[in-house]
Image (cartoon, coloured by chain):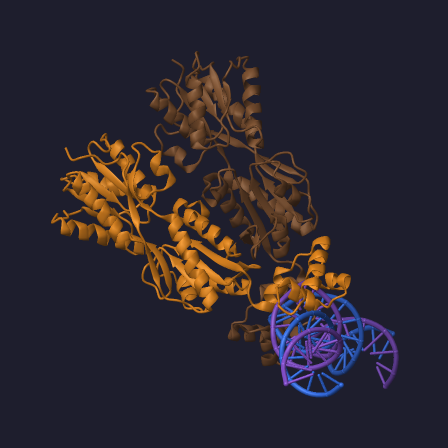
Chain colours: A orange, B brown, C purple, D blue
Amino acid sequence: MATIYDIAKKTGFSTTTVSKALNNYSDVSEKTKQKILQAVEEMGYLPNAHAQSLSTKKSWTIGVMFSESNEVGMKHPFFSAIIESFRKNAEREGYDLIFASRNLRNRDISYLEHFSYRAVDGIVVICSDPQDPQVQEMINSTIPIVVIDMNKQNCSLVFSDNIEGGKLAVNYLHSLGHTKIAHIAGDALTDAGAERIKGFKKAMDELELPIQDGYLINGGLFSIDEGRVAMEKLLMLEDVPSAVFVAGDHMAIGAIEAIKEKGLCVPEDISIIGYDDIEMAAYITPKLTTIKQDTDMIGYQAAKLLMKQIIQKKKLITSKRIPVELIIRESCAPKK
Amino acid sequence: MATIYDIAKKTGFSTTTVSKALNNYSDVSEKTKQKILQAVEEMGYLPNAHAQSLSTKKSWTIGVMFSESNEVGMKHPFFSAIIESFRKNAEREGYDLIFASRNLRNRDISYLEHFSYRAVDGIVVICSDPQDPQVQEMINSTIPIVVIDMNKQNCSLVFSDNIEGGKLAVNYLHSLGHTKIAHIAGDALTDAGAERIKGFKKAMDELELPIQDGYLINGGLFSIDEGRVAMEKLLMLEDVPSAVFVAGDHMAIGAIEAIKEKGLCVPEDISIIGYDDIEMAAYITPKLTTIKQDTDMIGYQAAKLLMKQIIQKKKLITSKRIPVELIIRESCAPKK
DNA sequence: TCAATTAACGAAAGCGCTTTCGGTAAAGAG
DNA sequence: CTCTTTACCGAAAGCGCTTTCGTTAATTGA
């Protein structure tokens, strides 16, 4: 690979001048700049990112930490949609994403250590466990960071309006005439789970609807299987709910399966509303009515917030609540 | 951040010795090595990846190029499953993944240029267009590379056994008594599409079944919508097929929708078999019978092949064909 | 006991780039 | 015509690490 020395030699200028020409310094004449640029073109010169980073202390990379309980990684449709949006926005600003591991040449180090090692300019984390010590360590470091999907950390936050989402779901169900509304919740240890529960309770309260015993059930970590077992429990209740707000689309899919297995129908017997609006939601039967999280906006705002911190060279403690939207499809019907 | 100088000063040894101790050189005594390691521990020293790369010409990063016609990026369920598997395996060897853009500080450069700039040790590309000039440029470069999902390039290749997959699908349909079998193909410009067509034709030939006019139809670039329109055309035929092999699950979902809209049923009226086995396949109605691609194995083999090239410091031209599997669910039924 | 090994360490150059600080020549001011 | 600006360029140090090659001291062999 051609270096700055090569093009210095070729043009007869010093490396200083070459570097300056490449970085648009004002103290290099237009004429020499053109000569240099031409040599760059001819020799196919490209700067070396490592040398550049070493010298400037800026790497133009952003570390991504991606963690959820089910260990599916990038296969997670909701998280990967956010990251994709984040990537597009970060890319526009010239940043590359790096997915770091905890393995440094067979030494087990923390994510923070790995990101320090790589000298990333910022970190974005999507992780459902608010107390993950790895995440805390990063939040407490000096590296700019934005965390997605949590809502009370001492750093920049981007999250969906989960309370509003919960209310939206309940109110919609109520508008269809349902009063016996249950909630298969996401684990309250996750912020998203807890907030949706809050929204559920708040809406029920405002509507003056009682939450019957057993109607608020923990569906765990948002998986299909956990949704199924939660629904099975609901179905064993003496007074089976006529509608259930499920805190995640995957769980909702499990719930629907449980209902079908019981010989009942959605939405005729029981209405189901999910949360997330993953791709699958529009194609299962019945098409899932759900609360859509705006993954594009989440990714966009996260990128924006991180860029801001990087530019200002200081960590900002702000939070951005992203509106959600009710997507009406076929899994909810008026109460008979 | 503590540097090697800091720990040299603290221990009284030279930076040379410190570096050697850290890299397990034999000419440093066990005693001094321990002292140095202890200082490293105390000061929380971590090497600087950029300095290291600059000096050693090895970056311990792998560039990922990810491109498909529908521009969904990481949201693509099949591709992201492969990358996730690739990541796990690469991580084990100490490599980080970097998703590069074509934007270098607002200068539009090629992926190859970007990867050179970042000095990646290797490249993995998943891209459905075999003639993409960007991909060709990378293949022709000196950087180790492995490309996934193509099968005739001058480099290391990993791909599913698409011919066998096509045959598997047709034979299964035939075993159910179907003879009027159509194929909604993936665009023949993609290797996967072309090979599945080959498999389809071969199996039909071996079974001595004729391929009726209009029964081999191009479904384009694997999207749901394209699957739907292809199926609509099939439904307008005078002699409607009783079974169709669809070259991708998304297209199959579109096809099923088209059938339902026409008032017909799957699999009672028409049997549908897809390809890929994306997550959704198991949850739509009817549950989709499909050919499963082994994404874990594809990712694993790709990582293995790339590591091998990196270690041997030379590009290898090999190809690895990964077996596929028939997953029988509910979208195919015996011919009435 | 002396020469020849071997063990342990360090000086210094180099990786490719940026940036500060000076210096020179040309332009402008008076 | 002299003095001050301004425009343009380069020397050199520095970023944090690796690696070659010497050097010195300790060890071995005879």
Residue at 56% across, 41% down? B126
Residue at 41% across, 56% down? A302
Residue at 73% across, 68% down? A14
- Image coordinates of residue A239 in percent, x first then y, are 13, 40
- Image coordinates of residue B288 in percent, x first then y, are 40, 29
User: Left of A151 or right of it: where is C25?
Assistant: right
Quarter of the image that includes the C terminus of chain A: top left
Quarter of the figure with residue A175: top left
Residue A250 visible within the image: yes
Residue B330 visible within the image: no
Q: Nearer the viewer, residue A82 or A128?
A: A82
- Image coordinates of residue B147 in percent, x first then y, are 60, 41
Quarter of the figure with residue B60: bottom right
Q: Nearer the viewer, residue B19 or D10?
A: D10
- Image coordinates of residue D19 in percent, x first then y, are 72, 65
Residue B192's place in the image compared with B116, above or below, is above
Residue D4's place in the image compared with B307, above or below, is below
